[in-house]
């Protein structure tokens, strides 16, 4: 009986260790994405302003999660379920990334339209100059 209980206890420890490692990977990935999305200087400035830089650099996942929750979701609540929080953080990052992608696509289209219109405008000016020179030549006796 003791052997069976010890075996179950070891399995539970392995499961918990696996979940902790999964959490650790996700949290570190979220942190990397935040830095990539907003830039190191911007993120560090916000973290320093909010006195959260040390917490983000901590070895404790709860502290890192708290920082991510505060920065991305603007909440400083107690973390009940880290898996649920990670899901919310991932959704928020996905939304921000999607929005940024759409903004970049729109900027690209705007740039293309401006470039096209600039070329047309330059061509119109050239044509006007040529026409004016032609008019000047015909006006001279």
Image: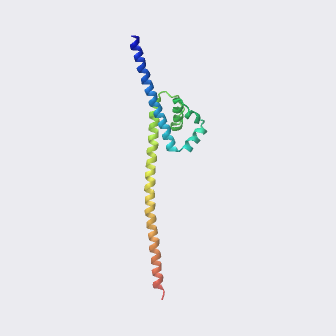
Number of on-image labels: 0
Location of residue 105 in the rendering, given as x and y in whole percent from the top left corner? 43, 52
Task: Looking at this view, name the residue that lies furthest to the front.
Answer: 3
Considering only vertical position in the picture, is 105 above or below 28? below
Q: Quadrant of residue 4?
A: top left
Considering only vertical position in the picture, is 41 above or below 53? below
Q: Is residue 47 visible?
A: yes
Front one among 26 and 72: 26
Location of residue 54 in the rendering, given as x and y in whole percent from the top left corner? 59, 34
Location of residue 17 in the rendering, given as x and y in whole percent from the top left corner? 45, 25
Location of the N terminus by quadrant is top left
Considering only vertical position in the picture, is 79 above or below 108? above
Could you tell me which residue is drawn at 44 percent across and 66 percent down?
119
Q: Quadrant of residue 110?
A: bottom left
Task: Looking at this view, name the residue that lies furthest to the bottom.
Answer: 141
Location of residue 32 in the rendering, given as x and y in whole percent from the top left corner? 49, 39
Q: Is residue 83 visible?
A: no
Would residue 57 appear left or right of 127 to someone viewing this image? right
Could you tell me which residue is drawn at 47 percent across and 78 percent down?
132
Could you tell me which residue is drawn at 45 percent across and 35 percent down?
88
Front one among 97 and 10: 10
Front one among 29 and 77: 29
Type of colouring:
rainbow
């Amino acid at each position: 009986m003791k052997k069976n209980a010890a075996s179950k206890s070891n399995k539970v420890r392995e499961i918990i260790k696996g979940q902790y490692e999964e959490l650790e990977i996700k949290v570190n990935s979220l942190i990397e994405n935040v830095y990539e999305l907003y830039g190191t200087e911007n993120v560090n400035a916000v973290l320093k302003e909010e006195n959260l830089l040390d917490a983000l650099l901590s070895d404790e996942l709860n502290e890192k999660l708290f920082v991510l929750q505060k920065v991305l979701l603007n909440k400083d609540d107690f973390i009940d379920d880290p898996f649920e929080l990670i899901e919310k953080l991932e959704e928020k990052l996905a939304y921000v990334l999607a929005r940024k992608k759409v903004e970049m696509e729109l900027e690209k289209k705007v740039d293309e339209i401006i470039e096209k219109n600039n070329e047309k405008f330059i061509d119109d000016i050239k044509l006007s100059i040529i026409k004016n020179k032609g008019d000047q030549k015909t006006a001279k006796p």
